[in-house]
Amino acid sequence: MPYSLQFLLDFVSSSSDQRSSRRSRGEIVVSKARIKTQELVLSSMLIALAVALSPIYFVWGPTKALPWQHMVNILAGIMLGPFWAVIVALFAGTIRIILGTGTIFAYPGGLPGGFIVGLTYRLLSRLARNKRLTLIASSITEPLGTCCIGGAATWYLWDPILGDALRVKFGAFLLFVSGWFVSSIIGVALGLSIILVLDKVGVVGRST
């Protein structure tokens, strides 16, 4: 084959490969953008849900316990992952504080729960074969994040500031987190019920 013809064929083949490579990279970028958009939309919906239900709460000391936030923590942690669950709790808590349906305790009481649920779900999804048990096991870790991590963080953050006033008001750490525990358990029951229904219709599989 003449050298000039071989060069032309190689050039055409190279150009075709480059176009194919650019097309593949473009498809990957579009796919990632679509996924990011879905995450933004779903997280916005969950934030709106938490805020819409925020007027329904019960007062525990200086806190306003909101079972719906723990429910949203489970939905966000499982359907979006730990990072987005923290973002959802952060924005929902901030809006609640602005509206007066939440306090500064919305941060330690909301952020750790969703993160623990999301992290547990990701780990168990790789290890366990039974998805239903994975959903249940992940959901029941929400009180661990809320009461143990969030409660401890609240205590150690506010104790140096309020000192004896904090200790006198709550008496003990267990009394402080007991209200959050009740709120969290209610949220777990609601969130788990919803997530199992969503899994049954295939929504959870498409979102995670």
Image: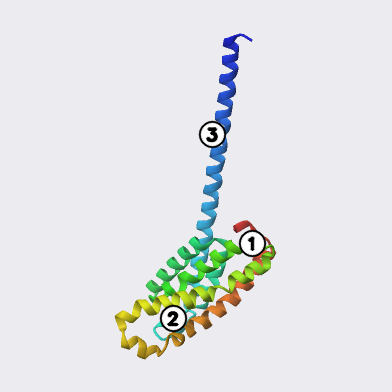
Which amino acid type is marked by label 2? Lys
Which residue occupies 31% across, 84% down? 163
Circle 2 crowding by C-alpha within 10 Å: few under 14, some 14–19, many from 20: many
The residue under label 3 is which amino acid type? Arg
Q: CA distance from mark 2 to mark 1?
A: 37 Å
Q: How far, Cα to Cα, is label 3 from label 2? A: 53 Å
Helix, strand or loop at mark 1: helix
Q: Name the residue at 52% across, 68% down.
A: 116
Circle nearer the viewer, 3 or 2: 3
Residue 205's x, y, as percent? 64, 59
Q: Marks 2 and 1: which is nearer the front?
A: 1
| Residue 121 location, quadrant | bottom right
User: Circle 3 sits on which residue?
Assistant: 22
Instruction: State the separation of the CA atoms marked 1 and 3.
Output: 36 Å
**Nearest to the observer: residue 110 or residue 197:** 110
Residue 165 screen position, x and y as percent:
32, 88
SS class of the residue under badge 3?
helix
Numbered tag placed on residue 64 in the rendering:
2
Q: Quadrant of residue 122?
A: bottom right
Residue position marked by numbered label 1 in the rendering: 127
- 38 in relation to 2, above or below: below
Where is residue 91 shown, x and y percent of the image?
Answer: 43, 66
Q: Taking the image as drawn, is residue 128 in sight?
A: yes
